[in-house]
């Protein structure tokens, strides 16, 4: 590790594992990848017989507000959030490495999708020289594959010719993405649309 002290350079016991290793029932979007539901808390933070203390800790460690529009159960309405903290091999996402996220064709949304990168320590959007911390489907110049899929790149250096699909990360800073779908459609709710793990690239 170089640069500032990072959560993952400390003893593992100090990590907010309620967030980064969710143990809530049905916390994962699908069984074939590590994407978790970012919000597992009801905006009221209450259930019939208890308050959602752990679920509240999980979300508000990373964010400052929530609404029912962010946990929509109605296709075509609101938005939904997925997050992950490890790559396909189970390693923490490290700002000194290069990664690729393959977004399959026909994402289940009526408006757009976005992949935003956050600093693991501060939970702020990743600071970088390009002042760009997000790739979205409505970004001008975004490169799509022949089948309509999109490869998004993360790392300290862009792959040649892929600058429009790249978010710069910083060596010494661990990070995590949030993948958002705005006006999600049925293929999200029935989990028929896959979102693969982020893969480290050489």
Image (cartoon, grey):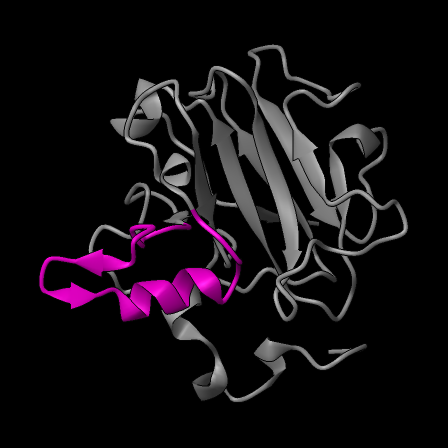
Residue 201 among magenta residues: no
Give percent across and percent down for residue 131.
Answer: 85, 46
Q: Residue at x 49, y 53 (%)?
A: 65
Image vertical order of residue 140 relative to residue 88, above or below: above
Indicate the quadrant containing the N terminus: top left, top right, bottom left or bottom right: bottom right
Q: Residue at x 74, y 62 (%)?
A: 96
- Between 142 and 98, which is closer to the camera in this rendering? 142
- Between 78 and 187, which is closer to the camera in this rendering? 78
Give percent across and percent down for residue 189.
Answer: 28, 28
- Left or right for 71, reference 92: left
- Left or right for 66, reference 96: left
- Left or right for 192, reference 200: left
- Between 3 and 189, which is closer to the camera in this rendering? 189
Image vertical order of residue 117 relative to residue 145, above or below: below
Say whether residue 21 is visible: no
Please state the extent of the stretch shown in magenta in the rendering: 38-66
Q: Residue at x 64, y 55 (%)?
A: 118
Residue 39 among magenta residues: yes
Give percent across and percent down for residue 67.
Answer: 41, 43
Question: Going by the picture, which residue comes out furthest to the left?
Answer: 49
Quarter of the image holding residue 148? top right
Quarter of the image holding residue 115? top right
Give percent across and percent down for residue 123.
Answer: 62, 62
Say whether residue 55 is visible: yes
- Left or right for 130, reference 64: right
């Amino acid at each position: 590790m170089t640069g500032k002290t990072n959560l993952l350079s400390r003893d593992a016991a100090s990590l907010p594992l309620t967030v980064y290793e969710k143990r809530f029932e049905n916390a994962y979007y699908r069984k074939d990848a590590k994407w978790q539901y970012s919000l597992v808390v009801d905006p009221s933070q209450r259930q019939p017989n208890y308050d959602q203390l752990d679920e509240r800790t999980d979300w508000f460690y990373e964010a400052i507000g929530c609404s029912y529009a962010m946990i929509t159960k109605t296709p075509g309405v609101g938005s939904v959030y997925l997050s992950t903290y490890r790559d396909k091999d189970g390693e923490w996402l490290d700002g000194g490495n290069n990664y690729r996220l393959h977004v399959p064709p026909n994402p289940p949304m009526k408006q757009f999708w976005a992949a935003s990168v956050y600093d693991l320590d501060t939970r702020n959007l990743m600071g970088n020289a390009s002042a760009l911390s997000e790739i979205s489907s409505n970004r001008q110049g975004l490169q799509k594959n022949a089948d309509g899929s999109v490869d998004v790149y993360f790392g300290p250096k862009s792959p040649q010719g892929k600058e429009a699909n790249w978010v710069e990360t910083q060596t010494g800073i661990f990070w995590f993405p949030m993948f958002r779908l705005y006006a999600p459609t049925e293929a999200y709710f029935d989990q028929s649309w896959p979102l693969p793990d982020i893969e480290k690239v050489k």
